[in-house]
Image (spheres, rainbow, N blue to C red):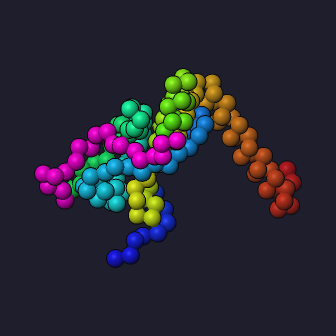
Amino acid sequence: MAREKGRKLIAQNRKARHDYTIEDVYEAGIVLQGTEVKSLRAGHATLVDGYADVKDGEVWLHAVHIPEYTQGTWTNHEPRRKRKLLMHRNEIAKLVGKTKEGGFTLVPLSMYFKDGYAKVEIALARGRKAYDKRQAIAERDAKRESDRAIGRRAKGFTD
């Protein structure tokens, strides 16, 4: 059977972009068990509570929920176990330096299959305060309204 090509999205953490200011984004492979892969291929995963940390030169993904595979037997996996992420050593060194700097955390943004391999996109992020969230929403709404006005003007409508 030929290996699949392209990128197939499994899960996305939209709340992370609202709650955090994203500084840098990294792609990492995930060490998975067999039933976890089958559950992911069925499109089941939740990243909302997930976070990553660096311990002893290795990056670990915590609190990501991959439900048990329904056709699995006694070999099924634990849904919220910690999973090792596969990254280059120099990327891990950058993450260690930034997270020790303070105020930064590692948050999973999305999980997907890329050319048949399970990948997770993690972000180096800084938490937002409530007023920052309101300001970001106001900026997004203002940009959307200006784009609408430009579109109406281009189509010949006048207010």
Q: Is residue 52 left or right of residue 136?
A: left
Q: Position of residue 39 (x, y in %)?
A: 30, 56
Please state the extent of the stretch shown in magenta in the rendering.
Answer: 71-90
In the depicted structure, whether residue 131 falls above or below residue 152: above
Q: Is residue 159 left or right of residue 79?
A: right
Question: How many callouts does the rendering have?
Answer: 0
Q: Position of residue 77 (x, y in %)?
A: 22, 48
Q: Quadrant of residue 38?
A: bottom left
On whether residue 86 falls in the magenta region, the answer is: yes
In the depicted structure, whether residue 125 falls above or below residue 44: above
| Res. 11 in view | no
Comparing 9 with 158, the one in front is 9
Q: Position of residue 78 (x, y in %)?
A: 23, 43
Q: Position of residue 113 (x, y in %)?
A: 43, 59
Q: Residue at x 51, y 28 (%)?
A: 99
On whether residue 24 falls in the magenta region, the answer is: no
Q: Is residue 33 left or right of residue 53?
A: left
Q: Residue at x 48, y 42 (%)?
A: 89
**Principal secondary structure, stretch drawn in magenta:** loop
